Amino acid sequence: MTVFKPSYRLLFESGELAARVEYAVQSLGNCQVCPRNCAVDRLNGKTGDCGIGRKARVYSFMPHHGEENPLRGRNGSGTIFFSGCNMHCVYCQNAEISQERYGLEVEAQRLAEMMLSLQEQGCHNINLVSPTHIISQILEGLLIAASDGLSLPIVYNTGGYDKVSTLQLLEGIVDIYMPDMKYADTEIAEKLSGVINYPAVNQRAVKEMHRQVGDLKLNEKGVAEKGLLIRHLVLPDGLSGTGEIISFITNEISKNTYLNLMDQYRPEYHAMQFRSLSRRISQGEYLTAVKQALGAGIKRLD
Ligand code: SF4
């Protein structure tokens, strides 16, 4: 059996990881880490749209057995749930964490201890949930964890409103990108998630992720080691633009993309204020989405 070595180990050994951490932390002084470009000084306690300042906040960390098969494997995905988000979905399924920002502030040392604890518990990866707005803080923690022996793949589990220049800072650090592709329509994205130009930003980000890591690769036990895994939540009344997103994936990314077409939408948070969002999707809506994916030639459908 080949022993997997995540690429950030090489960057750590060469000193490149430390250099990237320094750059990332300095960038908080005029934060334009994500497409919001708030330009606030987070080093001195100011906060922008995501509501998180100098320190990351963590709601919980644990082996997670509810993620996709290639991530959870036998021992679970080592999930760290970060508080705050750079998106504001009216139907958010985790609003206490992402919008109300429940959680505790953590220093880099504590974050590293969480990563190492998940490794000791046998998890297959470190799964960073909502990492976009706290990339700098995560890298600080990763540097310490790497120096103490962390060697699990890093999963970047994002809503997909990510900036290419920030993703480039993560090249060779993130092994598995798991972005959402939430919308194909700019106006719907703005109305339901408060994000400007989401489809174009999201598509550029997913292209960059795929350029870095390629299609999802599994080891002999079926556990993911590297690559891209896309999630798409099917919304009622076609609000998520499933057909267009599938066309983008097959035409611009790869028909070999691992796609999780999610059917678990339920009205949460402010969803009941929107007529279309006040119900779950029907079986027919989900079957239509599956047919669109299979018809377009997607081979790896979860
Ligand atoms: S990470 Fe937060 S403060 Fe920085 S640009 Fe994005 S939303 Fe604004």
Image (cartoon, rainbow, N blue to C red):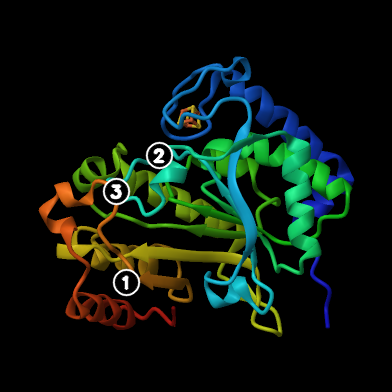
**Residue drawn where x is 81% and y is 63% of the image:** 120
The response on whether ligand 1 sits within 8 Å of label 1 is no
The numbered dot on residue 269 is 3
User: Which quadrant would residue 62 be assigned to in this image?
Assistant: bottom right
Tell me the amino acid under the disc marked 3: Tyr
Q: How much space separates mark 2 and mark 3, taking CA atoms?
A: 10 Å
Task: Quadrant for the C terminus, please.
Answer: bottom left
**Residue drawn where x is 29% and y is 43% of the image:** 193
**Residue drawn where x is 48% and y is 19% of the image:** 39
Tell me the amino acid under the disc marked 2: Gln
Is residue 92 found left or right of 10 in the rendered image?
Answer: left
Q: How much space separates mark 1 and mark 2, taking CA atoms?
A: 23 Å
Number of marks in picture: 3
From the viewer's perspective, is residue 181 above or below residue 99?
below
Residue neighbourhood size for the residue with mark 1, other residues' Cα within 10 Å, grouped as few (<14), some (14–19), many (≥20): some
Q: Give the foreground label among 1 and 2.
A: 2
Residue 6 in view (yes/no): no
Viewer-side residue, 66 vs 200: 66
The numbered dot on residue 263 is 1
Task: Quadrant for the N terminus, please.
Answer: bottom right
Question: Residue 29, percent across and down?
Answer: 60, 18
Choose the circle earlier in sequence order: 2 or 3: 2
Tell me the amino acid under the disc marked 1: Asp
Question: Residue 115, percent across and down?
Answer: 74, 52
Residue 7 in view (yes/no): yes
Residue position for label 2: 99
User: Which quadrant would residue 126 be assigned to in this image?
Assistant: bottom right
Question: Residue 166, percent across and down?
Answer: 56, 38
Choose the circle earlier in sequence order: 1 or 2: 2
Check contact, mark 2 vs mark 3: CB within 8 A.
yes
Residue neighbourhood size for the residue with mark 3, other residues' Cα within 10 Å, grouped as few (<14), some (14–19), many (≥20): some
From the viewer's perspective, is residue 175 above or below residue 109?
below
